[in-house]
Amino acid sequence: MNPFLALILPLLILGFIYILIIDNKGLPPWMERLSDNSGTIWTYGVITITVLSILKYWSNS
């Protein structure tokens, strides 16, 4: 099950996104809106990972 999750599932997701891009001759509208907010998504993602790492460190202490 782990090799499926680690290898095949990401390839399926990337293939699905590729098919969406090819069929629509460009990015779908929801992907364009998401890419407009990519800086915000990255910022909140980094903050979330940092906070979770700190909480994990504190819980192990």
Image (spheres, rainbow, N blue to C red):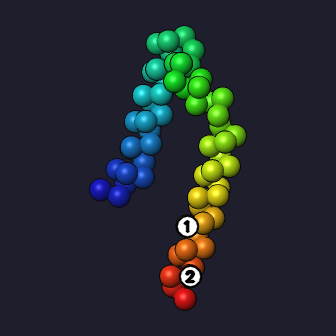
Give the residue number, with chain letter if any, for mark 2: 58
Q: Is residue 21 visible?
A: no
Judge by depth and name the residue closer to the eye, 35 or 21: 35
Q: What element carries label 1?
A: helix
Q: Which residue is drawn at 57% across and 15% down?
A: 26
- Mark 2–mark 1 CB contact (< 8 Å): no
Q: Is residue 5 above or below residue 20?
A: below
Name the side, left or right, on which 26 lies relative to 12: right
Q: Which residue is drawn at 42% across and 52% down?
A: 6
Give the residue number, with chain letter if any, for mark 1: 52
- Farthest residue in the left direction? 1
Q: Position of residue 12 (x, y in %)?
A: 40, 36
Q: Where is residue 32 in the image (x, y as percent from the top left)?
A: 59, 23
> What type is the residue that disc 1 sits on?
Leu
Whichever of callouts 2 and 1 sits on the residue coming sooner in the sequence is 1
Res. 16 image quadrant: top left
> What type is the residue that disc 2 sits on?
Trp
> Which quadrant: the N terminus?
bottom left
> Which quadrant: the C terminus?
bottom right
Name the side, left or right, on which 2 lies relative to 61: left
